[in-house]
Image (cartoon, helix red, strand yellow):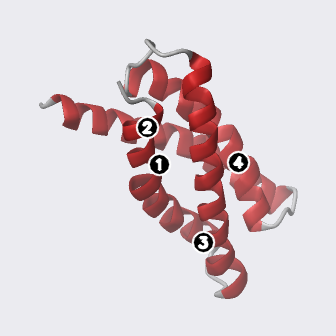
Amino acid sequence: MSFKLKEFLRAQLSAFIGGLSDLGIYSFCYKILVISAPFSNAISGSLGAIVNFTINRYWSFNNTEQSVQSQLWKFILVVIGSITLKSIGIHFFVDIWNWHFILSKLIVELVVSLGFNFTLQKLWVFKR
């Protein structure tokens, strides 16, 4: 298996693990705490990002040569962009089009994770 494919698959596994924690927190905030879907996404995305950063730094991209601070500020900017895109998408699916909150979250997660997060993490945050 090529290094690039292995790195991509590791990053996707990291995103999946972070996504599971994100989805659990999102569901809890939306159904139990009765917080709006976009705001529930902002809360869960922030906490899931901590899991994702740690796994990506030490395992997916295996880049500990740069300082945590230099990677973390870039990662935070990516997370802010990601959460913004996801919250806007979820707002349209849930609040405007009345789609199911979990289906909406999964669709938006997939699109933003592959098209935005992976690209910026590989080429900017954890770039060697």
Q: Quadrant of the N terminus?
A: top left
Q: Nearer the viewer, mark 4 or mark 1?
A: 1
Among the two numbered marks 4 and 1 on one chain, the one whose residue lies closer to the N terminus: 4
Badge 4 local density, few (<14 within 10 Å), some, or many (20+)?
Answer: many
**Residue hosting label 2:** 124
**Residue hosting label 3:** 89
Q: Nearer the viewer, residue 95 or 68?
A: 68
Q: Nearer the viewer, mark 2 or mark 4?
A: 2
Q: Nearer the viewer, mark 3 or mark 2?
A: 2
Q: Point out which mark residue 117 bears.
A: 1
**Residue hosting label 4:** 44
Q: Amino acid at mark 3?
A: Gly
Residue 2 higher or lower than 68, as above or below = below
Among the two numbered marks 1 and 3 on one chain, the one whose residue lies closer to the N terminus: 3
SS assignment at label 1 = helix
Residue 90 higher or lower than 83, as above or below = below
SS assignment at label 4 = helix
SS assignment at label 2 = helix
Badge 1 local density, few (<14 within 10 Å), some, or many (20+)?
Answer: many
User: Percent from the top left, x then y, of residue 33?
Assistant: 87, 56
Residue at the outermost bottom position: 97
Q: Amino acid at mark 4?
A: Ser
Q: Point out which mark residue 80 bears.
A: none
Q: Amino acid at mark 2?
A: Trp
Q: Amino acid at mark 1?
A: Asn
Q: Nearer the viewer, mark 1 or mark 3?
A: 1
> Residue drawn 66% across and 49% down?
80
SS assignment at label 3 = helix
Among the two numbered marks 3 and 4 on one chain, the one whose residue lies closer to the N terminus: 4
User: Percent from the top left, x then y, of residue 65?
Assistant: 43, 12
